[in-house]
Image (tube, rainbow, N blue to C red):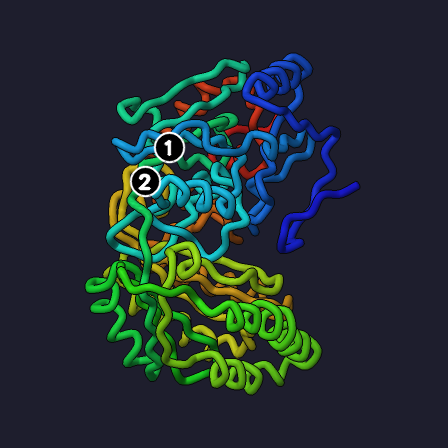
Amino acid sequence: MPIFNWARTFSFEPRSVARPADEAGVVRVVKEAAAAGARVKVMGALHSWSEAARADEVALDLGALCGVVEVDRQRGRARVRAGTRLSDLVHALAAEGLALPVLGSVTAQTLAGATSTGTHGSSLQVGNLAAAVVGARIVDGRGEVHALDEHDPRLPGVRLAVGSLGVLTELVLQLVPLYRLRESTRVLPFEEAVDALPEAIATHRYAKLWWIPHTPKAMIFTQDLTDEPGEPSAALAWVDRVLLNRGAFRAVLALGRAVDAWIPPLNRLVAAAYFQERTRVGRYDRILPLEMPPRHHETEWAIPATRAGEGLRALRALVDRLGVHVNFIVEARFVKGDDAWLSPTGGADACHIGGYTATPRGQDAWFGGVAEAMRALGGRPHWGKVHELDEAALRAAYPRLDEFRALGDALDPAGVFLNPFAARLRGRSLP
């Protein structure tokens, strides 16, 4: 029976699915696969649009490797099993008075899947989720376990490797005290919003911009630390989750898929209903994530943070030039630079700009145009989103690619963890 990713952009039918109960079980699976000349791939939560988690031979489900193993309150750290869902992790950490420094839009991913693909929020004060990793345990292609601490020179290669170096079984996270946020939104004409964005991201802990193509205005979200009491309204959350996301928004998307010419007026209707100035307060994990949206496709690129305005204006011009009807938001989020070798934000602060769509019509032209525009601005792809990079582009974007590949050859000389995606990253051919 085929296995699909969340967005149903690809499927695969592995020869077998292994569900080890612990690290020793992972070691057994890898050793047996290596002895048989088979390839192993961790599936994670299958929330990526790219085929990074495609497992055509032995699919590894780490769902049983979940939970917090140990908390060091003095250092603000926790050792967490790799298969833990972010949605479960935030509650477990909150019980200890601790929190992740940042969260992305959804929390359905596994911890290792989220860190390995560079999942991020939107802040120039903190990095992506992988930047919080200060230690790891990884099973290599021989079935040997490596324990890496924050001083291990291999850690910047391992903590964001898109699952291509081995099987992560545990991660050590540097955390922060549990915090609350006050969120405010502003709705401005597109040009004014783009001009206001640099100040918003510089003066607020978290900030991002949404624009719906074919509409004249954009919305800026800002979130800051607060001690104010309260939580987001349960009734309003139900309206957002059930009536809007599962009902009205899906209906609007279905109408746009049925009649392409309806997309621009439908987008204006959605913008008029949703783009409102408002404030709310609550615990961070109730403010930063979103309700799970309807299924859609995403491409996303990280460009230098200083070029955010150029990137947003380029995509607005692209919509007009291509004449495609885009029925999902364009989003701009910011991430502090880090030192991971394959990080989209490696070496410098970046603005991640995402182009999304929920209809196949015009998707290739739209995504191809987004990629061309972002690469012209020095863009690097989000590994979990739709993208194409050839060897020359990989080398141009990632100056430490050779070090990454050498580490891959050391940890996995036989290519046990290769699939087509990983083989391209590691510069290897599939057996």
Q: Quadrant of residue 257?
A: bottom right
Amino acid at pointer 2: Leu
Chain-order first, disc 2 or disc 1: 1
**Gap between marks 2 and 1 measured at Cα:** 7 Å
Q: Which mark is residue 41?
A: none
Residue wearing tag 2: 175
Q: Position of residue 338 (x, y in %)?
A: 28, 42
Q: What residue lies at 33% left-to-right and 78% top-to-bottom?
A: 186
Residue visible at 60% across and 31% down? 64
Disc 2 vs disc 1: Cβ atoms closer than 8 Å? yes
Horizontal and vertical percent position of residue 204: 24, 63
Secondary-structure class at tag 1: strand
Residue carrying label 1: 78
In the rendered image, the quadrant that contains the C terminus is top right
The quadrant in which residue 151 appears is: top left
Number of callouts: 2
Report the residue at 64% width, 66% height from top.
360
Q: In the displayed structure, would residue 340 be above or below residue 22?
A: below
The residue under the point 37% across, 77% down is 278
Q: In the depicted view, which residue is nearer to us: 131 or 317? A: 131
Give the residue type that dot 1 points to: Ala
Position in image of residue 400 (x %, y %): 32, 34
* Mark 2, secondary structure of its residue: loop
Classify 10 Å Cα crowding around label 2: few (below 14), some (14-19), many (20 and above).
many
Q: Do we see residue 345 in this rendering?
A: yes
Location of residue 300 (image quadrant): bottom left
